[in-house]
Structure formats: structure tokens, C-alpha cells
Image (tube, grey):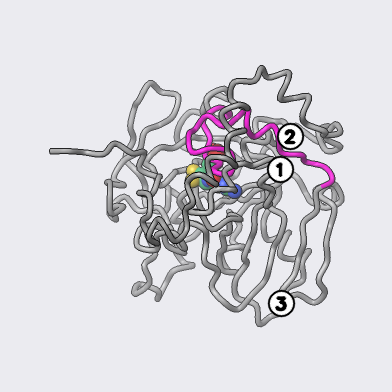
Amino acid sequence: MHVIRRRGWELPEGLTTPEHVFFNRRQFLAGTAGIAAAGSLPASAIAQRVTDIPDPTASLYPVARNAKYTVDGEITAEKVATTYNNFYEFGFSKNIVRAAQALPLRPWTVKFDGMVEKEMTVGIDDLIKAMPLEERVYRMRCVEAWSMVVPWSGFPMAKLVEFAKPLSSAKYVRMETFMNPSVAPYQKDFRYPWPYIEGCTIAEATNELAFMVTGIYGKVLPKQHGAPIRLMLPWKYGFKSLKSIVRVTFTDKRPVGLWEKLQASEYGFWANVHPGVSHPRWSQADEEVLGTGGKRRKTDVFNGYGEYVAALYKGMEDEPLYK
Ligand code: MTE
């Protein structure tokens, strides 16, 4: 039998639209020629291309750990978590650390718009300094069937919602990652509907587990993890937790994320972790625990966070809650 080996997360080429419609290969390769070149540069040369000023929030970390949220399992070694990343804007492999260093982090603003009392654009340092920072240890379960346990620093998403003052008629939060193909060359690949979009309901956003992340392992968040601010919804597959957020929109229409737009039959809006609901191309029954030499553990319903979130989905049994 002929099997095309492809990482599970990657979509087959031309999956949704005939290739000739969307993909001028020559133009794409020309645009991404710099990707290969960047990969062969020494780290110092990459650093020189970056014009960042020192991070004004770096001195805020470490922050006190909130002991309420514990995970049954060891914390993943920092070196493992910080070098095995999904950040498709910088590459389709897990090894994007060096490429991600090209992302300039200041100035950085987050725009709040849509169904809010008043639209506003806020500087990231003002936003972070206005928020009550704490550390939480959560398990993150990727849809690709691997997981890690990580100490994230940040603040409850409920505080972000409160800050934005949405209208009572708003039902969803739609979030957007930066769009800058000159530093994130894979955003030139127009098979993907960049920028990266994700969303959740207001009820999910204000659930106590929903967390805005600005740091990790007691330090400011590194670029490969989605600096300067990313989301963490630990009961959902990792793709819901978008990185490097620049826009937060309140709306009464269900947002369609990048992966749902590409392949709705595999990646849905809810994407709650469930071991009994297989991905169309692989089982979700268990997961590889990163940094343990390939050990696997059984996946938990809602990634082990059912006591906090199961009530959110009462009466919604007809919805595809687990993809
Ligand atoms: N956000 C953006 N903007 N781009 C991405 O490619 N990948 C997602 C999510 N957020 C992704 C993203 C996926 S698939 C996962 S599993 C997690 O980020 C990985 O987070 P980590 O690299 O910090 O472990």
C-alpha cells in the first residue's frame, strides 16, 4: 500500500480549492526563498535583524503561582517546551524558534472593536501592567495527540473581557494574530487564509480557566510561544489558543478560525478535547507526553478540566463539541 507520510496536522495540498486557483508555486517559492536562508544563518545574525527594544515587562516575572490549578503529571522540561512549537507563520515544522526571533515585539498594540462600548487600541505594556498577573500550571493537549505541562504566566481572560466592555448583545470573542509576511514568511503561502483567527463564546472567555498568557517558566513569553500575548484554553485542543494577538473583536456571529476555514470537517469551532471522538485521520484516545522519551498517557475528557467547563455545554449535545 502506498502511504504518503505527512505530519497529521498538515493538510494535503489543494484540499479545499483546486491548486491552480490559489497556488502559484513559483510566486510562493520566490516569496519564501528567505525562509531557507534564515534557517542557515547563525543565531547572532538573526538577532541583528531584530530591532526590538528590551522588553519593558520582563521585570514583572516571575509572578506568584496560583496553587488552585494543579496537574497530575510532571512539568515538562523548559528546554523541551520552548523548542517544540507550532507557529505556522514561521514554518511548518516544530523547529521554528530561530525563525520566530524575527518578529518585532514593540511597538505592539491590541485593538478592541466590534460590539464594545467604545473601540480602543491599547499598547501592550499598558495592558499587561493593568492586569493581575499570576502563574498557572496547565496541561496543553495538541490535536496532533501530544501534550505538555507548562507553567504559564498571565491573567484571566475574564479580566480582558471586563477591560474591553462588550455590549450585552455580544456572544463571541474573535481574536486575530499579527499579519506581517515580511517577518513571518509562511504568511506568503496563500493556501492558508492568514491571519490566524480563533474564537470562543463569551461564556467560555469568562470561564475561570480561560487565560491570557504573557509569560512562561517564570519569564516573559518567548516569541516562539506567541509573545507578547497569546491565549490558553486548556480544555480545548491547542490550535484554539492563538498566539501573538493584535485584535480582539466582540461579535454576535460565530467566528470561523483559520483551520476551520481550511478544513471544517477536521477542525471545528468547539474543539473540546475528548478521547472518544477520533480525528478523522487518527485516534484521540491517548497522547504522547513530550519530554518523556515517548511515553503515552490516556487522554482525559475536556483534557481533565471537566469540573470547570462541562456545565458550559449542557443542552448542546447536538453541537459537534469535540472537533
Ligand atoms: N497561533 C498561531 N498564530 N499560529 C499557530 O500556528 N498553532 C497552534 C496554537 N496557536 C498556532 C497558534 C497550535 S496547533 C498549538 S498546538 C499551539 O499554538 C502550540 O503552542 P506552543 O508552541 O506554545 O506549545
SS at circle 3? loop
Which quadrant contains ligand 1?
Answer: top right
Seen at 54% across and 48% down, the residue is 189
Query: Dividing the picture into quarters, in which one does residue 57 lie?
Result: top right
Horizontal and vertical percent for residue 49?
A: 77, 29
Which segment did they paint magenta? 82-107
Q: Are marks 2 and 1 in contact (CB under 8 Å)?
A: yes
Query: From the image, which quarter does the C terminus lie in?
Result: bottom left
The CA span between labels 3 and 2 is 31 Å
Residue 84 — which label? Answer: none
Earlier residue among tags 2 and 1: 1
First-in-chain label (3 vs 2): 3
**Residue under label 1:** 214
Res 43 → quadrant? top right
Residue 323 visible in the picture: no
Above/below status of 111 relative to 70? below
Dot 3 corresponds to which residue? 115
Pointer 1 local density, CA inside 10 Å: few below 14, some 14–19, many at least 20: many
Residue 158 lies in magenta, yes or no?
Answer: no
- Between the C-alphas of marks 1 and 3, the distance is 25 Å
Q: Residue at x 50, y 50 (%)?
A: 239
On the image, numbered disc 2 is attached to which residue?
Answer: 220
Distance from disc 2 to disc 1, alpha carbons, whole Å, reads 6 Å
Q: Please provide percent x and percent y for residue 257.
A: 52, 61
**10 Å neighbourhood of mark 3: few (<14), some, or many (≥20)?**
many
Local secondary structure at mark 1? strand
Which residue extends farthest front? 26
